Image (cartoon, rainbow, N blue to C red):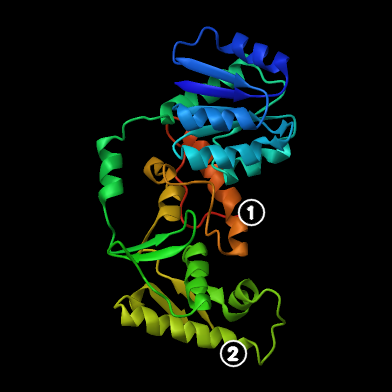
Amino acid sequence: MKIIYVDDERSAHVNFAFHIKERTDISMIAYFKDCKEPLEYVEMHDVDCAFLDIDLPGGNGIEIAKELKRIQPEMEVVFITSHDEFAREAYKVGGRGYLSKPYSNEELDEIITRVGKLVKRPPSAKEKQYDLEVPHIFAKTFGNFDLLLDGKSVHFKNAKVKELLAFLVDQMGGTASNAQIFFALWEKQEYTKSTSTYVRRTVRSLKEELDGYGIGHILISKRNSICIDVDAIACDYYDLLQGSRFALRHYNGKYMSQYSWGEETIPVIERMAMALETQSEPNEKLKYGISKM
């Protein structure tokens, strides 16, 4: 495994080198103290993993990570910080975790071993099959939301119609009332008798558009409420919650990025992602009814 380590403190370089001196799975390591040099380096050299300090002169590890992933998208990233609140930011930019200073030899060994299992590992036969399979109806939620029909994106005439479908997918089969839908999709407006018609029109349009594609059956309508039939669609988010390591490979730290309400689901995904990364097998497969609290 080829590594770069970015920290402006010389002592941090020495400490890291001491901790990894016995490891045989690291073939190369390059040390840097600022933001510019590591970016120049990865333009010319293959790197498997970057260990990045959060606080750096002239920038920070979060911003460097974004640039490194732009140059080499398959690169893994681990953050080193004295501030635990950056843990969530680590996942947002595709980080595999973080080390809190001062970290122990055991903590470093654990995270290097975890990353090593992911780095440039040839996909198994099952993983290849997972990537090749094209479900008839697939809700893609990692990154921006999209609905795929036989591998092709479904076009929605109205952005709110698409957002409504995304919101129902996020509810994982739970029934959403008209009021819940309104406050999610029109969060800055007041819910009144007049504005409540927005929901009814949007629900009607969604049904019509899905019927036009012959997949209207994925919606289950009730009086003043609606839900998605989770048994009628495939979804990367649902697969991950059921313990699929194959789905984990597609999680890039982002979930339905175009919708602000999607932020509330990210901690659920991150907990499951962490469980899958740190355990040989999850102790318990989570089901669609998992609480977001």
Q: Looking at this view, is 15 or 274 the one in front?
A: 15
Horizontal and vertical percent for residue 209? 38, 81
Q: Which residue is drawn at 71% across and 37% down?
A: 59
Q: Is residue 1 above or below residue 280?
A: above
* Numbered tag placed on residue 220 in the rendering: none
Dot 1: element: loop
Instruction: Point out the image quarter for the N terminus.
Output: top left
Horizontal and vertical percent for residue 271? 56, 43
Horizontal and vertical percent for residue 169? 47, 65
Dot 2: element: helix
Q: Which residue is drawn at 37% across and 72% down?
A: 218
Q: Is residue 171 above or below residue 81?
A: below
In the image: residue 36, left or right of residue 169: right
For label 2, count other residues whose C-alpha is less than 10 Å away and answer few (under 14), some (14-19) or many (20+). Answer: some
Q: Which residue is drawn at 69% across and 88% down?
A: 192
* Numbered tag placed on residue 293 in the rendering: 1
Q: Is residue 239 visible?
A: yes
In the image: residue 138, left or right of residue 206: left
Q: Which of marks 2 and 1 is nearer the N terminus?
A: 2
Q: Mark 2 points at which residue?
A: 197
List the single residue furthest toward the bottom: 194
Q: Can residue 232 be seen in this view?
A: no
Instruction: Point out the image quarter for the C terminus.
Output: bottom right
**Three-letter code, disc 2:** Thr
**Three-letter code, disc 1:** Met
Q: In this view, does 20 lie above or below 189?
A: above
For label 1, count other residues whose C-alpha is less than 10 Å away and answer few (under 14), some (14-19) or many (20+). Answer: few
Horizontal and vertical percent for residue 165? 47, 71
Q: Distance between the residues labelled 2 and 1?
A: 30 Å
Q: Nearer the viewer, mark 2 or mark 1?
A: 2
In the image: residue 31, left or right of residue 281: right
Do the residues under discs 2 and 1 have CB atoms within 8 angstroms? no
